[in-house]
Image (cartoon, grey):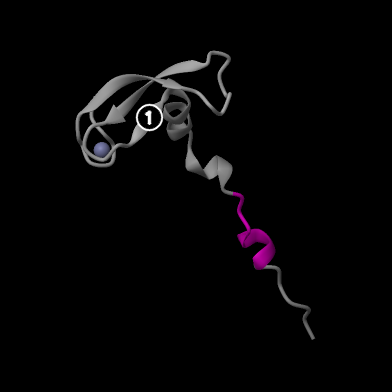
């Protein structure tokens, strides 16, 4: 597995899940040896989702036509 940021070598690592997002205290993840980027199962799942789902569009309301004379 290679790092998405720097293409460095990532090593499997068992990390403590302090956020409590998983039932298990320890989660398996990967850590980059070069830049130190950490990817766990939760982060990996989030990155797979389309970004547009979490970005609400405000252009609809911003383009409301002003009152015509
Ligand atoms: Zn990296």
Q: Name the residue at 71% across, 72% down.
A: 65
The quadrant the C terminus occupies is bottom right
Number of dots carrying numbers: 1
Camera-nearest residue between 46 and 15: 15
Q: In the structure shown, which secondary structural element does the residue marked by tag 1 occupy?
A: strand
Q: Is residue 67 above or below residue 11?
A: below
On screen, residue 40 versus residue 2, left or right, reads: right
Image coordinates of residue 36 in percent, x first then y, are 29, 37
Residue position marked by numbered label 1 in the rendering = 39
Residue 61 among magenta residues: yes
Seen as rendered, the residue at the extreme bottom is 69
Q: Quadrant of residue 13?
A: top left
Camera-nearest residue between 52 and 69: 52
Q: Is mark 1 within 8 Å of ligand 1?
A: no
Q: Is residue 26 above or below residue 9?
A: above
The quadrant the N terminus occupies is top left
Q: Name the residue at 48% across, 26% down.
A: 42
Image coordinates of residue 20 in percent, x first then y, are 58, 24
Camera-nearest residue between 68 and 48: 48
Taking the image in four quarters, ligand 1 sits in the one at: top left
Residue 42 among magenta residues: no
Image coordinates of residue 64 in percent, x first then y, are 70, 68
Crowding around mark 1 (Cα neighbors within 10 Å: few <14, some 14 to 19, many 20+) is: many
Camera-nearest residue between 69 and 50: 50
* Highlighted magenta segment, given as a residue range: 56-62
Q: Name the residue at 20% across, 35% down.
A: 8
Q: Is residue 29 above or below residue 58?
A: above
Q: Quadrant of residue 67?
A: bottom right
On screen, residue 64 versus residue 50, left or right, reads: right
């Amino acid at each position: 597995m290679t790092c998405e940021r720097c293409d460095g070598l990532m090593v499997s690592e068992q990390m403590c899940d302090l956020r409590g997002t998983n039932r298990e205290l320890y989660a398996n993840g990967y850590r980059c040896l070069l830049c130190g980027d950490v990817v766990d199962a939760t982060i990996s799942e989030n990155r797979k989702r389309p970004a547009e789902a979490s970005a609400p569009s405000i252009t609809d309301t911003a383009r409301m036509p002003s009152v015509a004379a």
